[in-house]
Amino acid sequence: MDTRFPFVDWFRNASPYINAHRGRTFVILIEGEAMASGRGEQLIQDLALLHTLGVRLVVVFGIRPQVHEALTAAGVEPTRIDGRWVADRAVMAHVEQVAARQRLWLEARLSLGLPSTPLHGVELSVISGNLVTAKPLGVREGVDFDHSGEVRRVRASAIEGLLEKGSLVLLPPLGFSSTGEVFDLDASEVAQHAAVALKADKLILLGESEGLEDEQGALLRQLSPAEAEPRLTNAVPGSELARHLQAACTAAREGVARTHLLSWHNHDALLGELFTRDGVGTMITQHRYEQLRPATLNDVAGLLELLEPLERRGMLVARSRERLEYEIDDYMVIERDGMVIGCAALHVFPDTSIAELACVAVHDNYRGGERGERLVEALERRARQRGLNEMFVLTTHTAHWFVERGFRSASLEDLPPLKRETYNHARKSKVLVKQLT
C-alpha cells in the first residue's frame, strides 16, 4: 500500500533492531579521511541518534590525513615503513597537537544543542582520557620506531563505568605508558583492542571501501574470519584495507559477535547497516548470520508469516498453527538474523520407504540465492539417513524447478495409500518422484 510517508514503513521494519541494539556496546572507528572530507557533521548526528536509542558508544577517531597535512606544512618528512611512520620528536609534536584539536572539535560538535540543529534536546556527556596504555614498537629490522607504539591494554572497567553512566567514550589514536610517555597508535588497533576488552556486541570500521568484493566485483555481505583472512595476503601492508581487515578478523576470533566494514562515503552506511536486515557493507562473524537448521516450536510464528502469502496465492496448501506445531520436527528452516526466510518439510509415511517433500518455500526477497536447493538437499540427506528409497512432491506451480533437480513425473498410483486417499483432486497438483538409491 502506497503511503505519503515512506519512512514510516522503514521505521516499522527497523523496530526489531531498535529493540535489539538498546543497551548494546558498539565500538565505532571513524577514519580521519571522513573528517577531512566534511563527513564529520553527518556522522556525529548519526552517533547522537544511536545514543538516544540506548546504544552504548565508544568512538575511536583517526587523524592520519590531518597529521600528514600538518607535517607537510611544517616541512617535516617522516620515515615510513610498511605504511607506518616513525614518530620521532618532531612528528610526535604534530601528532599530539592534531589529536587534541580533533578531540576538541568532536566534543564541541557532540555538545551542539541549538533548536535549529539535529542534536537539539540531546544531552551527551563525552568523556576521553588516559584509557589506553601503550608500549613502544621498539626497534624493528634495525629501525627504532621511537614513539610509534602498540596497544598494551585498554582500561575496560573504567570505560564500562563511563558507559554505565550514559557517557559516550571518545578514544584518540594515542596511548600512555607507565613512565608518562605518549605513543602514536594505529586507530584500527585501538578500536580492535577496545572491542575485545569490552566484549562489545559490534565493532564498526568506517573507511574508504564499502566492504570486501568477490572476483566479479560484487559486494560480499558476510564472511567468517577464515574466509576473510586470506585476502590479507593481497592487501598492501599498512593500507587501510589491511589494517581494517586485520582488526575485524582478530576481533571476531576473540569474541566480538559481529564486525562490520563500511564506507564513510555512503551517507546512509552506519544506520543502513544497523537497522536493515541485509545491511550495506561486509560483516565478519564467527556466527552464521544466515543458517540452515532444524525447526523448533519457536519458529512457528515465523513459518506462518512466511507461508501465508504463498497460501493466499494458491501456491501452497494452508497450514494451521496447530498442524505446524504437531509436524514441527519434520521441518528445516533458513533463518536470517532472527527471521525465517525459507522452509521445507519431510513427511515420512509409516511402514513405507517413501517420504513427501512438502512446503518448500523461500521469502520473495531472498529468492535466487540457491536457498531452495539447500533446503531440498538437506532433506534428501535426512531421507537417506533414514534409509528411505524415494521422495515425492505435489506441486501446482513449480514442477519444472523440481524436474531440474532430479524429480520425474509420476502418477497417483506411485503415492503411498494414505496420501492417495487424501489427495485434493480440485487442486490437480502434479506428482513428481525422485529416487534416492
Image (cartoon, helix red, strand yellow):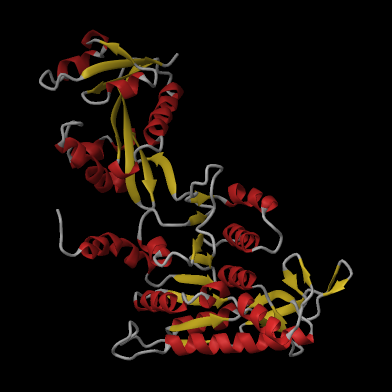
User: Where does the image place residue 245, in percent across and percent down from the top left?
Assistant: 61, 59
User: Where does the image place residue 254, in percent across and percent down from the top left?
Assistant: 60, 61
Position of 74 with respect to 245 (left or right) is right
Query: With respect to residue 246, does 41 lie above or below?
Result: below
- How many numbered marks, from 0 up? 0
Query: With respect to residue 85, does 233 lie above or below?
Result: above
Toward the viewer: 234 or 176?
234
Please identify the quarter of the rendering in which residue 3 is found. Answer: bottom left
User: Where does the image place residue 279, in percent across and percent down from the top left?
Assistant: 41, 57
Which image quadrant: the C terminus? top left
Position of 404 with respect to 79 (left or right) is left
User: Where does the image place residue 317, in percent across and percent down from the top left?
Assistant: 18, 31
Q: Residue furthest right?
A: 142
Position of 148 with respect to 202 (left or right) is right
The reply to whether residue 300 is in sight is yes
Toward the viewer: 105 or 163?
105
The reply to whether residue 297 is in sight is no
Please identify the quarter of the rendering in which residue 247 is found. Answer: bottom right
